[in-house]
Image (spheres, rainbow, N blue to C red):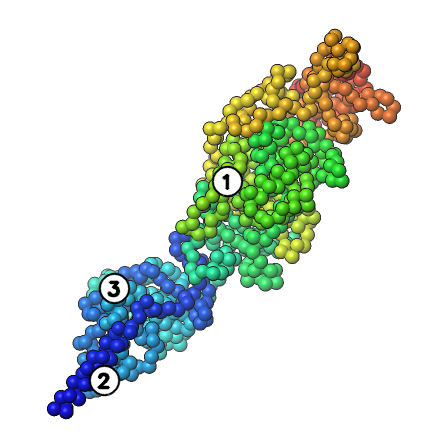
Amino acid sequence: MKIKISLAICFLSLCLYIGLIYFSFDSKDLFKCTYSKVLFDKNKEILSVFLDSNEQWHLESEFIPQKLKSAVLLYEDKNFYSHYGVDFLAIIRAFKNNIFSSKRSGASTISMQTIKLLEQNKRTYFNKFNEIIKAFALENAYDKEEILRLYLNNAPYGGNLVGVASAGLFYFEKDLKDLTWSEAALLAVLPNNPGLINLEKNKDRLLKKRNALLDRLFEKGYFSKDILTLAKAEKLPSFKTRKNLAPHLARRLLADKEKIVSSIDKKIQIKFEEKAKEYSYKLQQKGIKNLAILLADTKTNKVLAYVGSNDFYDFASFGQVDGVIAKRSVGSTLKPLLFAFAIDEGLIVPESLMLDVPTFFSNFAPQNANKKYHGFISAKESLQKSLNVPFVSLLAEYGYEKFFYKLKDILDFEDENFKKYGLSLILGTKEFSLEDMVKIYLGLGNYGNFKELLYEENAFTKENKKLISDGASFLTLQTLKDLDRVGLRQYDFNTIISWKTGTSYGRKDAWAIGTSPKYTLGVWVGNFNGEANANLYGVSIAGELFFELLALLERVNLEFEKPNDLVSIKIENQTGYRYDYKFDFKEVLYPQSANVLRTSPFLKEVFMYKNKEVNSLDENFIHAKKKIILNLPSNAQAFFAKEKQNLQSSNQNLKIIYPLNNLNIILPKDLKSKQKLLIKLINPKKEKLFWYLNQELIFEGKEESLSLDLKKGKYVINVISENGSNDFIKFNIF
């Protein structure tokens, strides 16, 4: 009786113990470890991976390919899908072998091995018993595929590699879905052989294990004899060190997250990083150490490539500085934005003439990069030539405070002190990042809709700021599309891009930024330590890299579509402003939602009586006649009177550019009280010219300007080249 009671107590105790172990198993806390931080590309391919808190490479894979499943289950647990966590026949066989023979055989199922990986206990019969109980609990909490995934994601693969995805990456540089049968077989035998897990020391024994499994797979009909031969011929791998892709972005996005599926396109990222490294050698020969690149999809605002520096691991050149977010002087790259704003404001159309003459704004006297001036020049050419003086004047008319807060609306910076920058704001005195500038050009490429840049594949933009009309954006993009690629003509073929370069004051930064219907690309070149360099020039340094990068992309020959809000308006032929029935006109496109285009600031309607200007207070006003005269500020009058223009457009014909046709001109007097008129023309072919004043030959030669002493009266100037091209103008002197 006592024996029965004792047995009953033992049995109840055993049941209680089993129940305690079973029900105390917390399936929610399984492998509550910190995996390695991983940045994936948009297709879930690994870009960057970092050691976990245990100094291990520990990657998690959500997908286990069928090849790997077949190899692992045949090697480890062929009855995996039929048992409930424990293979009792295998346990009996193993127990028998352990007692009656020297032959050892394993009895642990995948489920039991998963528990063992979780608890890391010593191999004892007691611990094995606990593993059996917990294996039942595991099977009750998870389905078979989840258990297999738990096992493979936490199995050791040699050194500090944990998880089959880590092994695939560091041994084969592959995603698991791309494994061969030979590679799958090797990954199947590695975790079960801790003594062989070092690929460098036990290659012969490991090779036999792998090939034996391949033979079994062949016998089971998984592949043909030819595949078996090829699989056995594959050499064993070795651990491969790797450099992360997009390391600056990985560091930025993974600061507080374990893994992120980014918007980066791995194929493009690899190409861009290789090009950055290649181009950096050329830069180093010029004393330039750093560059940064940012590429975005114009339609989605998703970033496709992110190169923070030419070499993240170059500590001597500050390679870990992120050039994409570093604030730098942006040179002339803001001019297209002002151009578009000014169109919507009614200040200009691309054909409007602007003054490019020495100009003083209080204590600020802007100069063009080449220290030369063009006199009258169209707004379109001013942007294409990136002239400083016309754009400083345009900012003065638009309002630098208004422009500052429009920028703030786009980029959301904290700075409120617009007076700190004044009119020099348009020349790049306020610093912005490459990320900021790409965002601006993305807005232009999206017809004035400004959104946040997106770095995650599943992210979406919540807010859309419409700050420029579709039409003004399109006119700006068309102007930038025709930008002359000086020194870059080898890149003209099949590349359509609306782009702009910029060079900061003191030659510390070179920029090239552009947008197309498919891509928006930004490039910065310079030195992270702020060191100036005479070779830092937007077109030649940043522009060349810009077009070399574009050459790596597909679909870069798309045109922006003309939007529906563009209507035809009339502008006067003389200076390109609103037609007011005083001169001949031409029709141009203009945004329907824009303010009414202003009349010309250079033409003035006056009343003349006996060659004298009079107003309504004059007694002879009733007899006066209306006249249109050229009304220039004194600095412009001085320029046209004294300076020679340097117009170098070989594609233009002979053309008189000043004075304008049918103008009435009042000339200022110099110190000797003589009135002089400077006639300016374009002679692109440098031909000999014959100048006629009122049908009388007055000069012959190749000069492009002629200063004439003229009295009041009507005049006709006709200029004929030696090859027959000609131009003429009519004007009146008052």
Query: Which badge, 3 or 1, comes first in the chain's sequence?
Result: 3
Q: Which mark is residue 98?
A: 2
Q: Quadrant of residue 732?
A: top right
Residue type for callout 2: Asn
Query: Which badge, 2 or 1, comes first in the chain's sequence?
Result: 2
Q: CA distance from mark 3 to mark 1?
A: 48 Å
156 with respect to 470 (left or right): left
Would you name the residue on which mark 1 appears? 465
Q: Residues within 10 Å of mark 3 (few under 14, many from 20)?
A: few
- Report the front residue among 179 and 320: 320
How many marks on residues? 3
Q: CA distance from mark 2 to mark 1?
A: 75 Å
Query: Which badge, 3 or 2, comes first in the chain's sequence?
Result: 2
Q: Residue 708, percent across and down?
A: 79, 21
Q: Residue at horizontal 53%, vertical 35%?
A: 468
SS state under label 3:
loop
Residue type for callout 1: Lys
- Dot in front, 3 or 2: 3
Q: Quadrant of residue 160?
A: bottom left
Residue type for callout 3: Asp
Would you name the residue on which mark 3 appears? 143
278 with respect to 101 (left or right): right
- The quarter in which the N terminus is drawn is bottom left
